[in-house]
Image: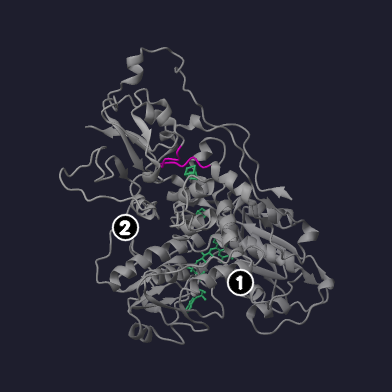
Amino acid sequence: MSAITEVPQKLTFRRYKDGDHKVRRWNQQIFQSSYSYKCPTYIQSTPPCQGSCPAGEDIRGYLGIVRGTEKPPMGADGKPTMSWQEYAWRRLTEANPFPSVMGRVCPAPCESGCNRNEVEDHVGINSVEHFLGEYAIANNLAFSSNAAPTGKKVAILGGGPAGLSCAYQLTLKGHEVTIFDEHEHLGGMMRYGIPGFRTPRDVLDAEIARIINLGVKTRMNCRVGTEVSMEQIRKEFDAVFLGMGAQAGRALPTADSEAANVVTATAFLKAFNDGRLQHVGKRVVVVGGGDTSIDVATVARRLGHIEHAKPTDAELAIAGRMAHDVADISAKQGADVTLTSVFNIDKMQANKHEIEQAQAEGIDIRGSLVPIGIVRGADGRATALRVMRCEAKLVGQRLEIKNVEGSEEDIEADLIVSAIGQAVDFTGLEEFNNGKGMVSTDKNYLVAGQPGVFAGGDIIKPHLLTTAIGHGSIAADGIDCFLNGRDLEKRPKIDAHQFDLMRKMAEKGIEIKQVNDPIRGTDKSGGAVHNFDNRSERYVIPHDKLFLGHFSYVPRNQRDVITLDKESALGNFDERLVALVQAQAVAEAKRCMSCGMCFECDNCVMYCPQTAVSRVKKSESTTGRYVTTDYDKCIGCHICADVCPTGYIQMGLGE
Ligand SMILES: Cc1cc2nc3c(=O)[nH]c(=O)nc-3n(C[C@H](O)[C@H](O)[C@H](O)COP(=O)(O)OP(=O)(O)OC[C@H]3O[C@@H](n4cnc5c(N)ncnc54)[C@H](O)[C@@H]3O)c2cc1C
Ligand code: SF4
Ligand code: SF4
């Protein structure tokens, strides 16, 4: 076992700046024109983790529940209505119904954005998500909906993450949903692309079953555009969501490179995931550099080759033309796998850890090579990939490649796999093609010029699972508006699932009284949440608005990864990632600095020189309403804001 990454050993922020040691007059230190004479306000903002999660999960919210700051609601018997693990899972799945899958394969852009990177290392958000997903499966947690049926019917074309996410959100709103999918099973690329040693099929099945059990109908083995027409769909349904993804692989971008043993990554992985592909040839060359190419290379390495097998076995299985001959596992030997990328290895798009794992498994990764053609044998099949050294860089979205003349080289191959991207198959659905091989939508994911037709996921732009899930969720809001005859909403600048203080207060049974006269509440009035402002939809709180000095160095609790080598990878289809145990997950959640939301540290209560800040009485206190200010006592010294670790207190009231 080995840890995923090196943990930084030093704090990266400085508690004091140069010049802080100089003694200044006390009134210069306390009174500053920008915020003195103003009293504290409580400002909810979006933490950068949440702002960077394409599915818009309330990350701070579920980490707060795991760490024990926010508690599940109490029942009439005075006991919690559910465990904290379930409460956290329910908060998470409001945005994303796939925490177990996500916890395994999401590259976690949330962690790159995490403010804790400014202290020592990001919070292991993805590993807590993984833990919660595992808890839910082990405890058979189910979704439930109490929305009244609306009688409206929605067709979802494609049962990948985008379609399933949209189906989930629409069903929770009371609409009747039918998913059409050309495959036998739901899941899209989660099942037919990503191999089972990364997304175990029992985990995937459990998370999909929960959505279907809400009452979602399915029509499997049914391709819209060929078996069912759009005309029929429009007749039978009130709205449509296009989530067909990008199923077609892209061929090698070189002239005359068609051959039986030159295949695409999507065809290769589908044949493997369908169980048709049982072994590959002795030498496999994968062209790519992204995650898909790593999946192909690691699958090829695990499959290995059989010394006396026919050289055409693998390509026929990939073409779907024959069932595999029953190979004797013990006769398998490791295949030599080479992966080429136009980028330098350190610039490849694939996840760095996946690159390292692939190298440990003996895959020869070669950067800065551009394919220029194939070399053929007498039978017309490829015998090698011809490459040239190159320098590649991205200029905006455009890839610029400069070849190094005279550096041609042939890499011998029995099978060449092109993993350089995917395309949408528009057969029978040409009306949605924007002319560039994709579908165009607006911010509500409404398809241009097609009322009632929405789209999301890879069909718009191939990206990540979490992105497809986010699109499906936002499109469901648009479809709901459309079905109810409402105008589509203007989406907020920061389009995420946010903590809702009013909902939290209602959940706890705290009465929010009607505001009469005067319109604005005061600290003496129960008529309004008078000094609170939710700016989450427009403000992401940066690290320099936090009091980072409050947080000391705490190493990240990392999951173990089982690293295989050249020999042990052969025939090993076991999962390599080990979930955190509960104590580790709680410890990891405790590292969260709760950016932009009170986490009940009591600093403001302790440090206020006027004793103007006090705790809200227990029966009325809840997350985000933990402290209150007595404005008769407050002198606007801003000490409470200075010592607030989370940036929740800002000076503002009183202007
Ligand atoms: C090999 C590989 C590895 C990847 N690894 C990762 C990873 O580690 N992490 C990550 O976040 N992302 C990863 N991705 C990207 C991720 O899988 C996709 O971004 C995501 O699956 C897109 O979801 P989707 O629902 O838009 O499309 P898909 O997942 O492609 O699902 C589309 C569904 O629509 C069905 N369909 C298509 N056309 C029709 C039709 N006409 N009628 C009926 N049904 C139809 C298909 O059968 C399919 O089930 C990977 C992708 C690949 C290919
Ligand atoms: S889905 Fe990905 S980006 Fe979002 S919280 Fe999970 S790991 Fe982070
Ligand atoms: S410290 Fe917590 S709230 Fe802040 S960005 Fe990181 S995970 Fe999000």
Compare residues 356 and 173 and report the one nearer the observer.
173
Q: Amino acid at mark 2?
A: Arg
Compare residues 84 and 318 and report the one nearer the observer.
84
- 597 within the magenta span: yes
Whole-percent x, y for residue 198 in the image = 64, 62
> Which numbered disc, 2 or 1, marks the residue that appears first in the sequence?
1
The disc label shown at residue 257, or none: 1
The disc label shown at residue 178, or none: none
Q: Secondary structure at mark 1?
A: loop
At horizontal 73% and vertical 65% (from top left) the residue drawn is 302
Residue 254 shows in the view: no
Report the Cα–Cα distance between label 2 and label 1: 45 Å
Compare residues 451 and 399 and report the one nearer the observer.
451
Tally the numbered discs.
2
Q: Judge from the rendering whether residue 101 lies leftward or rightward of residue 94; answer left or right.
A: right
Q: Amino acid at mark 1?
A: Ser
Q: Secondary structure at mark 2?
A: loop
Which residues fall within the magenta stretch?
A: 592-600
Q: Judge from the rendering whether residue 280 lies leftward or rightward of residue 146; answer left or right.
A: right
At horizontal 70% and vertical 84% (from top left) the residue drawn is 323
Compare residues 114 and 426 and report the one nearer the observer.
114
**CA neighbours of label 1 inside 10 A, class few (<14), some (14 to 19), many (20+):** some
| Dominant SS type (magenta) | loop
The disc label shown at residue 491, or none: 2
- 628 within the magenta span: no
Query: Quick check: 278 above or below 566?
Result: below
**CA neighbours of label 2 inside 10 A, class few (<14), some (14 to 19), many (20+):** some
